[in-house]
Amino acid sequence: MLRQTLGGALAAAIALSAAPALADEGMWTFDNFPAAKVAQAYGVKTDQKWLDRVQAASVRLTSGCSASLVSKQGLVFTNHHCVVDCVQSLSDDKTDYVKDGFLTTARTEEKKCAGMQAEVLVSITDLTADIGKATAGKTGIDFVKARDAAKGAAETAACGKDEAFRCQLVTLYRGGQYKLYKYRKYSDVRLVFAPEIATAFFGGDPDNFNFPRFNLDTAFVRLYENGKPIASPQHLIWQSRAPKDGEVTFVSGNPGGTDRMLTVSQLQTQRDLALPIGQLQRSELRGRLIAFGERDAESKRIATDPLFGVENSFKVFYGRQFALNDPAFMEAKRAAEAELRAKVAADPRLAADIGDPWGEIAKVQGPYADRFLRLRQLESGAGSLSELFLFARELVRAGQERAKPSAERLPEYGDAGLALMAKQILDEQPVDAALEQLYLGFWLSKTREYLTVDDAAVKQLLGKESPEAMAARLVAGTKLADPAERKRLWDGGLPAILASNDPMIQLALRIDPAAREARTAWETEVSGPTDRAAERIARAKFAAYGDAVYPDATFTLRLSYGKVAGWTHRGVTIPPFTTFAGLYDRATGAEPFQLAPRWVAAKDRLNPATVYNFVTTNDIIGGNSGSPVLNAKAEILGAAFDGNIHSLGGNYGYDGAINRTVVVATSAATQALEKVYGQTALVKELTAK
Amino acid sequence: MLRQTLGGALAAAIALSAAPALADEGMWTFDNFPAAKVAQAYGVKTDQKWLDRVQAASVRLTSGCSASLVSKQGLVFTNHHCVVDCVQSLSDDKTDYVKDGFLTTARTEEKKCAGMQAEVLVSITDLTADIGKATAGKTGIDFVKARDAAKGAAETAACGKDEAFRCQLVTLYRGGQYKLYKYRKYSDVRLVFAPEIATAFFGGDPDNFNFPRFNLDTAFVRLYENGKPIASPQHLIWQSRAPKDGEVTFVSGNPGGTDRMLTVSQLQTQRDLALPIGQLQRSELRGRLIAFGERDAESKRIATDPLFGVENSFKVFYGRQFALNDPAFMEAKRAAEAELRAKVAADPRLAADIGDPWGEIAKVQGPYADRFLRLRQLESGAGSLSELFLFARELVRAGQERAKPSAERLPEYGDAGLALMAKQILDEQPVDAALEQLYLGFWLSKTREYLTVDDAAVKQLLGKESPEAMAARLVAGTKLADPAERKRLWDGGLPAILASNDPMIQLALRIDPAAREARTAWETEVSGPTDRAAERIARAKFAAYGDAVYPDATFTLRLSYGKVAGWTHRGVTIPPFTTFAGLYDRATGAEPFQLAPRWVAAKDRLNPATVYNFVTTNDIIGGNSGSPVLNAKAEILGAAFDGNIHSLGGNYGYDGAINRTVVVATSAATQALEKVYGQTALVKELTAK
């Protein structure tokens, strides 16, 4: 599953060069798409009109996914796993939409997804020079503060108080460019259709990131404004025919993040420290969730969705870790870096401008290692997955930060971001106490373990209590599960926060100074110097390779091109298509290879030869989940929902020989909607001329 | 905790040289102890008589620990964590000796520990030349088979049918020497005294491998023969006085294994593949056990001991992984290897004899990576911790192998090892069905995950069943929890196995061909060539450094020397002693910092200044748990039970500046036995003249 923060590294070390992108490589911004290269390779014209049409129908979901408009009435096509949190939230111990699917027969049955917002990119403006001016001559944390203040000011200036828009100042090429992305936003997103999880995620974790694959990982939501579906004449055309082997394909979506521009010293720190620590903790949490889910049926229902999330991340980072653990992969990275440095060194004027950012970044790796665990346990990963703790931390910080001018706040509390934050905190959503206790106890015990019992912050965190007892007490005692209480504290600001006797608020307050200290130290010694040096590495790349390079992914709109194609690895060739017949062959009757009852019943009504899932050479990563996969005419052939196992190395570099995007075909979705789910109105809407 | 397979790597890269051991470094065999060096450094004479006396009172426990004889009536002193499995086995849902401690007031109350055997080393004979002759000219699996057959034959020849002895042909210096170790064995070991786990393991996992420390990690067992305690005039003297700062100390015990002689390419494979895979699985299992234990009080009781075991291993391998992840550490290893290779290259005759074993081993790393997961999931780690599966596998293999002549069997089924194996399979011991289901389900699901659904062996393993359903069915259906059924199958041999309809036996039979294939491939392509090359690296070391090198640990008797000393790290100095007063200061009332009720009650009867735990510079590792820590006169000052966090890097190299052995003092044990537990008879026996 390619939801954001989940991305992709077992690739052979082929396309890792810092040099211009190879065939089919690249997650290109819409304002620097290599149309000439595509025309040459595939004979397809992607002119400005073509690009504008695709951009206008491409949707970003705040659940960390991509999607597309597919009807005139605001209907949006995405993946099941992009809305599964919503499906879970709408379920309870009596009605389990995750297990049974969510079907509607009328608009009135469409249900709002808490916290979800949909966004359509309307413009891109280059502000690189402005940010450059604002940060000139600054270093370390002064640089970080000046940059973040300038970014926040630019966002506010661009969107003003217009609630219909969201503005984000995006750092591209790790500081090589700063661009203002303006989005039309839709904060009333309602669920229209979701299949059973046994259908959407057939094969479960064992098949995840593998192929052949047999998943109807699709869902539909609808965008509303003022209680009505929006009008969306700019939607894409739904194409029900199956794709052809070798057919050109485009993926328009929001890859969440890649690390292809990291230096070798940064990659070593990822390999030796950050990835292993994250994976060890994730693996334990996975185990806790599995055993928790085995208690009884209701525990299993509650744990299913979170477990899939953790297992998906685990596999993603497993792929990344073992890509970097491959000596040949690292050697290719070393060679690429040496090539770029040689080009710089060969041009004295350039060398004088660039200096030695690689050496500067290498020096930062010591402080990185020293500061990493504190940052992770107290700040960036505080609370693990506990919603209640995150509510508390955000309420506390929002209270503190909103008392300051926007430019002086922590950047995530700047004016431009507050509306979405408020929505995500205040929307009503179920909170499961048992899971919360699990997450909180996990975080507290790992913090004690990694920082040790004798650490001052740990003592402050736990006092004389055990992690388990504290987690139980806090979850039982807090009122933050109630959206009215959250609203009271949000509206009341810092005075209300300081007056609160809520134990979770008190915990967040108690640990806040140590958490801020960890963050400040990080920005001063690690991220500030790194970002400053990375700007010059980007300049070196532009100088060496012109605009034939694409930026690392940033969960902003990108376009990739490629074709439908299987692959061959270690002598085994994997064909590009699977069919409904393959699904029925693979089913065992045992989870996660169990067919949903509707599919057992529908078998004879389906054409067994229908193309179900297929693979393409498009270069994507986590965040691209739900992205429309388009043909030359920009018609939708499917939704990207996964990468193959080799694509996981894509976080660090693309290998066109074996990296593949995994797509659920519209041909299969159309037939399933009609023949399995009886969703004739939905099909009619999709195929309306 | 330093039980075997648990060992120690955050050390700075100081004493990693292949050159002669530095001060206090080394786990020396009793037939090559550097007495002259010790005399020079500490002014202590350790002549043959001294060594013989220590050897005769040093005990190896088959629970993976060390111990010592401390009275004329077969009383043995060891760690609590070395007998905790026994304490757990003797407990049930009504009587919890783990929680409450196990106390006796008469010999009749001493209870037998299932599966445990105690062994005292009586002689060492060099058979290097014999094994050399038997393997001359052989390579790959032919070498492995010839060597193992020759070893088995030597063991049988040395012990014959004498049931009182056990013979082991030990490979030292990774093939540089082969020596026959003959042990007097005692297979009736009874529990005499064990404190509450809250006392033995105060501070639990958070304090494990840390210091300051406050653990009464002690226990006593007694050796019986023919229903009576053995006579043991050769016991060591119990010294109740506290050790002094700087006092010389010796540790006599059985370090389980180290990897100090591995080549750089082998260490890279450990770093990049073997350690991370093991830790990721261990971490998930840990999470499963934690959440399992949180179900209810009885689940917690059952899971406590296994969880400690898994957490201990986790910390040990965490230390190892991050030692190898330290670039400076690896650089020191590279330098040491280069030094040895240069010495070889400088001597043409030596160079001709040695060849390039480093290059040969580097070439083996590819096959290692290709074969590792299959070997781990199907053979070396099959069944995870499931006793029932291991019973089934050993019964199946014993049935198959005993039908062949001893020399043609898998070596662990050779005649010399069968008696102990039979004891461990046939002794009555409780098996917990819920835990068994957890372990088995875990193994089956990880095997599917790591080998993939489409693997032929996975299909054979699971058929159309889920791992969870199969685990439940097998644990419910097998009769192997009944020792009578195990005896029937052991005695009945292969015909009884093949006729059995026990589902666990059938699983073990079904997967056996794939497991054997994985093992054969490993021996042919990986371990055979590696071991053959390692023999020549050992020869190179002897040639370069003479006998001033010690072999990697092999769970055989070793002697290390050092002194009582704290240490300084990053400007912080840790004193060498803790006291009872410190224990009461550290107690919070919350697990695992909760005092046992007896200790709360005894507070005023104890001298707060009593030395409780202390640290020494002795070079030890997992397997040394329970080792007597001796003064110059070979009197017992305590029992080693742990290393500090820096000592975990000791698996790959010793750093005398910061690596420390953690010891529980006899001064504290004596006082606790008297004042907390009222064990006056035991103290009288210990201090009898």
Image (cartoon, coloured by chain):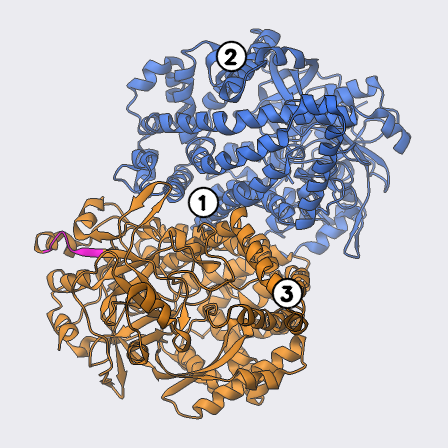
Chain colours: A blue, B orange
Q: Secondary structure at mark 2?
A: helix
Asked whether disc 1 touches disc 2, contact meaning CB atoms under 8 Å apart, the reply is: no
Vertical comparison of A200 with B453: above or below? above
Amino acid on which the number 1 mark rests in the picture: Glu
Q: Is residue A114 visible?
A: yes
**B572 sits left or right of A196 in the view:** left
Could you say which quadrant of the image residue B30 lies in?
bottom left
The residue identified by callout 2 is A415
Alpha carbon separation for disc pair 1 and 2: 41 Å
The residue identified by callout 3 is B346
Amino acid on which the number 2 mark rests in the picture: Asp
Q: What number of labels is visible?
A: 3
Please state the chain letter of the residue tagged with numbered disc 2 in the rendered image: A
**B304 sits left or right of B668 in the view:** right
**Residue located at (62% from left, 14% from top):** A132
Please state the chain letter of the residue tagged with numbered disc 3 in the rendered image: B
Q: Is residue A558 visible?
A: no
Boundaries of the magenta span: B606-612
**Residue located at (66% from left, 50% from top):** A327
**Callout in the foreground (3, 2):** 3
The residue identified by callout 1 is A298
| Main secondary structure of the magenta stretch | loop
